[in-house]
Image: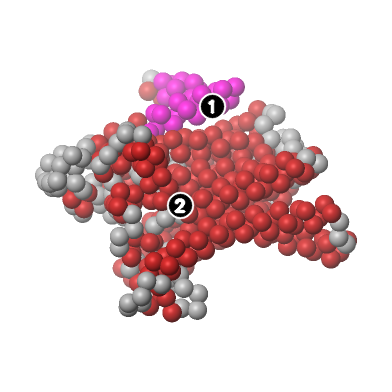
Amino acid sequence: MVETAGKSILAKLLRLDNPVGSLTLAFLLWKALLFVVITLCPGPGYDTSTTLIAREGSGLVSSPTEPLPPSLKFVRWDSIYFLHIAEEGYVFEQEWAFSYPRILGLFVSGIRWSGGIDGPVNTALVGVILSHIAHYYSVLALYSLSANIFGSATSTQKLICFLSAALHVISPAGAFLSAPYGEPVFSLLNILGYYLYTSSLISEHKGAVLLRDLQVLTAAVLFAIATVVRSNGILSGFLFAYDAAILVWTIFAQGLSVHKVRRLAVLIAGGCIVASSMIVPQMLAYREYCMSGGDLRPWCSWTVPSIYNWVQSFYWDVGFLRYWTVSNIPLFLLAAPMLAVLCKSALWALKAPSTLRSDSGGTSSSQVSPGSMLFRLAVPQGLLAVMALTSYHVQIVNRISSGYPVWYWWLVSTAMGSFQDPQKSRRGLSIAAQAMVAYALIQAVLFGSFLPPA
C-alpha cells in the first residue's frame, strides 16, 4: 500500500510536460523538510558562537539556553563570519578569506536603505531567503543548460534534463543550500554562466555573431561574480583560455580574418573579466594593509602580494597536502564518494561523447556536438576534484560540487542505458539518489545542532 502510494506521488512529480511545475513542487517539499529538521534541532551543540549574536533592538547577547529565532538556526560555521562582515564590514584580517559577504551585504544594504530591516537576525533571514531563491533558479538553470547539451525534443532528452535538475534539488550540499552561505549563489551564477557560454556556441554555429559575443561577455561577468562568491569560480575561466588557444592555433594554421580577430578579442576580454574578480579584491586589501604605514603584514612583501593566500594558509592551514594528516582520515573517507563521482564523471565526459549522442536520441537540437561542450565543462570539475583532494579542507567538496553539472549528467546517463546493463544502471541511480537524500538529512541534523563536519 505504502509503496503504491509512493509510486503514485512519484508519477505526479515526474510530469515531463510541465517540468518547471514538477521541479518547483519537488523543491518546495525538499526545502520544507530540511527547514523542519534544522529548526527543530536542539541546543547550541559543538559551538555556541551563534548565541553570541546580538538580538535585534537589544544591546544584550542571547543566552546559550534561550531558543534561537529560526533564521539564526541556519547561522553555523562560516556563516557567522558572513553575517558579521555583512553587518560591520571587514574588521579582522582572517575575514578576507570570504568574499560572499560582499554580495550578501549589497542585498542587506539595499533592503536596509529602503527601511525594511535592521539587525543580525534579519540579516540572517535575508541570507536564508537569498539562498533559497538562488538554489531554486539554479535548478531551473540546470534544466536549461541540460537542454543546450542534450536537446529537449524527445521524451528521452526531456527526461535527462528533468532528472539532472531533480538531482540538483537533493544535492549533497543539503543545508548549505538553505543557509546564508555562498554555495547556492555560486551554483546559480556558475550554472547560468555555463548556460550562456554553451548558448554562445550555439549562436556561433547559427552565425549570430553579435548575440554570441554578448553571451560570451555576459557569461564572463557571471563567472567573475561567482569567483567573488567562491574562489573556485576562477576555474570556469578555463573555457575562455581553451577557446582562445584553439583559435590561436587556427589562426596559425589558416591565417587571420576579421571574424577570428573579433572572436579572439571577445575571448580575451572575457578572460580578463573573470581574472579581475581575483585581482581587484587583492588590490583593495593591499591598499588597506600595505599602504597605510606602520608595521606591514608579512604578505605585503611577497613578490605577488595576496591576502587571500596568506589568510588561507596562516589562519585556516590551507595548502598543498597540508590536510593530509592521520586525524583527517575520517574526513577524506567522508569526501571519498563525491571525489570518486566527480573524477569518474569528468573522465566520462572527456572520453564518451559518441555514446552520449546515441543515448540522448541524436545530437542536440543546436547541432553543436554535445561532446565538445561536455569536454569544456568537464575540465573545471576535474580541476576542482584534484584541488579538493590535494589542497582544500577536503570535506567541503560535498557542498561546493553543487555548482558543477557534469556529475549530475553522468548519474542520469548511466540510468538511461549508457552501459551494457540498463537495469543495473537504473538501480545505481536510485541508490545514488537515496544516498544523497540520507546524507543531506543527516547533515541537516548535524548542521542544525552546530556539530561537525562542516
Q: Position of residue 81 (x, y in %)?
A: 31, 54
Q: Amino acid at mark 1?
A: Val
Instruction: Report the side of 28 relative to 407 (left or right).
Output: left
**Disc 2 target residue:** 229
Seen in the picture, residue 111 relative to 373 is either above or below; the reply is above
Seen in the picture, residue 94 relative to 440 is either above or below; the reply is below
Stretch in magenta: 4-31
Q: Secondary structure at mark 2?
A: helix
Q: Position of residue 391 (x, y in %)?
A: 45, 67
**Residue drawn 74% across the image and 35% down it:** 365
**Disc 1 target residue:** 20
Tell me where residue 16 sits by quadrant: top right
Q: Amino acid at mark 2?
A: Val
For the residue pair 383 and 330, the one nearer the viewer reads as 383
Residue 419 visible in the shown view: no
**Residue drawn 28% across the image and 46% down it:** 75
422 is within the stretch colored magenta: no
Seen in the picture, residue 93 relative to 48 is either above or below; the reply is below
29 is within the stretch colored magenta: yes
**The furthest residue to the right:** 254
**Residue drawn 46% across the image and 65% down it:** 282
Q: Total marks drawn?
A: 2
Tell me where residue 70 sits by quadrant: top left
The N terminus appears in which quarter of the rendering?
top left
